[in-house]
Amino acid sequence: MTTRGEQMLALRRRRMAASPPILRGGFRPFFFGGASWGLIALILWLCSLAGALTLPTAFDPVAWHRHEMLFGFVGAVVSGFLLTAVPNWTGRLPIAGQPLAALVGLWFAARIAVLFSGSFGLFPAAVLDAGFFFVLAMLAAREVLESKNRNLPIVGMVVLFGLADAADYASAAGWIDADLGWQLGIALVVLLISIIGGRITPSFTRNWMAKRGIRQGLPTQPGRFDLFVIGATAFALLWWLSAPPGWVTGGILVAAALIQLARLARWRGWRTVADPLVLILHVGYLWIPVGLALLGLFEAGLPIPRSAAIHALTAGAMTTMILAVMTRASLGHTGRDLKASPATVFLYLLVTAGAVMRVLASVGVIRNYDVALHVAGTFWAGALLVFLIAYAPVLWGPRLGERA
């Protein structure tokens, strides 16, 4: 007689076998959907800036752009990563087939609801959008709890991300402080990068060095110093969220930036120049101390625009790390060689150039702000477009050696 657990396992195996390749792992639809929406949303935003169209949303245009880049684009990729990481953490089969399709459908419905919230109101969009993250957290929590895995705090951060999403709607409705929701969302993603990026970056770097016979100066597994850095960064971001601007807030953020930089230096990323798939992880992580430092200088009252710091953390750290993880995971989880193609290298260059251009435009290094903004957006959108062109066959097709 089979147990309930064995029955569920058999059901998941049947779902995976009967599903089209795009629904055989969470990374597939969410990486493709997230990149597609990031590209579409950015094009709509740039057209809105140029006066070519009026966005039919209840959010003001800047708030919609910020919301959809953070909770739409970044949220989708975080979801794809989580749904892919949980089976690795727990040893259980991934969520696939119809349940995965329903989850993707909920995310997509939220995007449409937000875009057309000018007609349908904020409440339906808020229910769908924040509800998506709560459903995702429930599914992940079930897997983690049943396997007694240690990564439950990551699931808790998804719940907090959903609350930040809901707070952004409350801000749009004028109920709470206008910045709380998106600031909390950014803080949570920065912490996720510090935690997850702090695991995979030194690990992949160490593996790459070891394969090439490098025996000295290998990055170590996360230890007490890494926990201190994560804790100090969490404290700095919490202080930023709750305390008034000033030298104290600025100093705490700059201090967090310095210890983040020291952490990154310990991984010796400059030795991985020969492998773009590894090097880009270090480049993406470098934007964390840059963004925190710029934010600290702004909070301290120095003539640094807040947008420079925010875009260093979003267009820089988040998007670069997202493309680094999406390309590597898409190759690795479909049985392909972990080797960066020319298209992959090109999209890395585009996203880096776009982030640099966007930050330089904010700080006034480039005189024509509007032109710089559109060039930066074009680079950033180009990186997503190249990803979609190069990786759509990977995400939609079967794993190598597997039948469609």
Image (cartoon, helix red, strand yellow):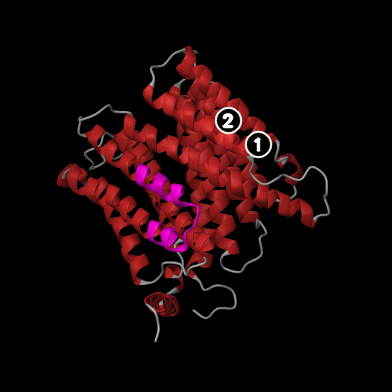
Is residue 156 located in the magenta-colored stretch of the structure? Answer: yes
Relative side of 151 to 119, left or right:
right
Furthest residue in direction bottom, as rendered: 1
Q: Amino acid at mark 1?
A: Leu
Q: How many numbered circles does the render carry?
A: 2
Circle 1/circle 2 CB separation < 8 Å: yes
Q: Amino acid at mark 2?
A: Pro
In the image, 114 versus 329, the foreground residue is: 329
At a point 52% along the width and 59% down the height, the residue shown is 89
Which part of the image, by quadrant, shows the N terminus?
A: bottom left
**Lower sequence index among marks 1 and 2:** 1
The residues colored magenta run: 141-161
Q: Which residue is mark 2?
A: 289
Disc 1 residue crowd, few under 14, some 14–19, many 20+, Cα 10 Å: many
In the rendered image, residue 390, in percent from the top left (x then y), is placed at 55, 60
In the rendered image, residue 241, in percent from the top left (x then y), is placed at 39, 27
Relative side of 193 to 5, left or right:
right
Is residue 159 located in the magenta-colored stretch of the structure? Answer: yes
Element under disc 2: helix
Q: Main secondary structure of the magenta part?
A: helix
At a point 36% along the width and 60% down the height, the residue shown is 139
Q: Which residue is mark 1?
A: 264
Relative side of 158 to 400, left or right:
left
